[in-house]
Amino acid sequence: MPLPFLTADRAFDTQEDDVALPFDDHDQWRRPYRPGPWRVGAAALLLLLASFVLIAGVIIAFAGGMPGAGACFVLGLAVIAAALRLLRIGVWVSRHGLRRVAFFATTTVAWRRTSELRTVQQPVRWLGLPRTVQGQALVAARPGGEPLTLLTDHNADFLSRPEAFDRAADTVEAWGAEYRSA
């Protein structure tokens, strides 16, 4: 039985018109793709762990061990913050430039400071681990600087989803083509 509303897991190509919505503001930072299942699954497991830690903190507080309960609450909040930061990792675009958000650092590059965006074959890190495999990467070339790797087809957003990587790379390249020339 088909439902009359669209969900987040609908197919990408179901709409023929790909026009921007009237409230679509290109000045706000946005991720041009959805987070992948590996990233969402890892964040869900971290949130599950945080719930157990917070429940343990409540039990310890009722038992009368306030220093232990405080440590559990701080640890639980740190795990929640890590899960939320894990969900923010990725490439964000706006009219002003592109932003690569990593777990501990964020790099922002204005469109005018990128000479080109291209997809290249190169060794890429598998799920962000030290192990490298041959794959594709979306690279932003900067004049006078070293290239900035934005997306790879083996990261937590695109592992086993080559079509999603191609769509995301094309979308970021389209943003770059539109705003680099402006």
Image (cartoon, rainbow, N blue to C red):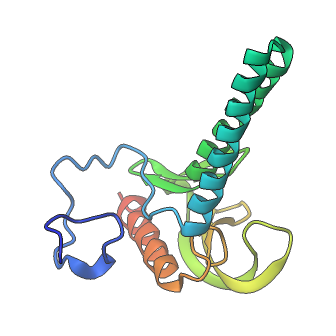
Name, please, the residue furthest toward the front. Answer: 63
Q: Is residue 178 left or right of residue 127?
A: left
Residue visible at 15% across and 51% down in the picture:
22
Q: Quadrant of the N terminus?
A: bottom left
Residue visible at 38% across and 59% down in the picture:
179
* Relative image position of residue 141 (x, y in whole percent): 62, 68
User: Looking at the image, can residue 167 be seen?
Assistant: yes
Q: Quadrant of residue 157?
A: bottom right
Which one is in front, 119 or 41?
A: 41
In the displayed structure, 126 sits above or below 140; it is below
Q: Is residue 47 left or right of residue 98?
A: right
* Relative image position of residue 46 (x, y in whole percent): 67, 49
* Relative image position of residue 81 (x, y in whole percent): 65, 37
Residue visible at 70% across and 48% down in the picture:
103
* Relative image position of residue 49 (x, y in whole percent): 70, 45
Q: Is residue 173 left or right of residue 132?
A: left
User: Looking at the image, can residue 89 be seen?
Assistant: no
Q: Quadrant of the C terminus?
A: bottom left
Which one is in front, 88 or 77?
A: 77
Disc count in the image?
0
Which one is in front, 47 or 115?
A: 47
Q: Quadrant of residue 54?
A: top right
Q: Quadrant of residue 41?
A: bottom right
Which one is in front, 181 or 71?
A: 71
